[in-house]
């Protein structure tokens, strides 16, 4: 298994909604290991399968030393008043924008054995759960920005060295 390269803004896989993981076979197990290896790079809070070019509903997370994955995650609960938090994305490198996120989030899904699991949290974990499930639904965080800020984000993306 290995750290996989991150797909960047403009890659169609990032805007394509994922499909649920069906049969858990060696390919799915390999995907999970790649997601875990890829999220272990310092400064990464989460990696969605789409960010490594795979259209399956799965992501890994690395928040405050808690590292794991979830298959077929669905955001089932958010609560609190949405607040602006500084947010960035591996697929939109070096750019950070204030994004509205709920202070609490909960997702449900399952593990490699098919056992139902639940992830929930506040702060960075809530932000990561919302951010990664957005990826799996075909959205980037810049899609959630207010129009004037989204225009500015697009301008900065077009002017970036990586675009």
Image (cartoon, rainbow, N blue to C red):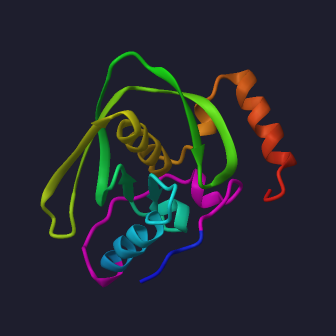
Q: Residue furthest right?
A: 159
Q: Is residue 94 above or below residue 21?
A: above
In the visual, does 81 lie left or right of 108? right
Residue 69: percent from the left, percent from the top?
A: 31, 60
Residue ID at (15%, 69%): 113
Q: Is residue 62 above or below residue 33?
A: above
Residue 51 sits in quarter: bottom right
Segment colored magenta: 6-27
Residue 157: percent from the left, percent from the top?
A: 78, 46
Residue 153: percent from the left, percent from the top?
A: 74, 36
Q: Residue furthest top?
A: 81
Q: Relative to the observer, which residue lies in front, 34 or 26?
A: 34
Residue 131 on the magenta span: no
Residue ID at (59%, 48%): 89
Q: Is residue 162 above or below residue 105?
A: below
Q: Relative to the observer, which residue lies in front, 3 or 20?
A: 3
In the visual, does 78 lie left or right of 140? left
In the visual, does 85 lie left or right of 159? left
Residue 1: percent from the left, percent from the top?
A: 41, 83
Residue ID at (49%, 52%): 17
In the visual, does 143 lie left or right of 59? right
Q: Residue furthest left?
A: 115
Q: Is residue 70 above or below residue 25?
A: above
The C terminus: image quadrant = bottom right
Residue ID at (44%, 54%): 46
State the predominant SS element of the stretch in magenta.
loop
How many numbered tags mark residues here? 0
């Amino acid at each position: 298994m290995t750290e996989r390269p991150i797909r960047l803004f403009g890659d169609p896989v990032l805007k394509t909604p994922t499909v649920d993981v069906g049969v858990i076979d060696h390919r799915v197990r390999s995907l999970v290991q790649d997601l875990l290896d890829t999220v272990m790079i310092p400064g990464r809070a989460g990696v969605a399968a789409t960010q490594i070019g795979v259209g399956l509903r799965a992501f890994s997370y690395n928040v405050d030393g808690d590292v794991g994955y979830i298959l077929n995650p669905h955001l089932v609960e958010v609560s609190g008043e949405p607040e602006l938090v500084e947010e960035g994305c591996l697929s939109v490198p070096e750019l950070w924008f204030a994004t509205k996120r709920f202070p609490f989030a909960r997702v449900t899904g399952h593990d490699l054995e098919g056992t139902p699991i639940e992830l929930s949290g506040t702060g960075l974990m809530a932000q990561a759960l919302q951010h990664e499930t957005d990826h799996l639904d075909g959205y980037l965080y810049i899609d959630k920005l207010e129009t004037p800020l989204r225009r500015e984000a697009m301008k900065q993306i077009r002017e970036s060295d990586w675009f």
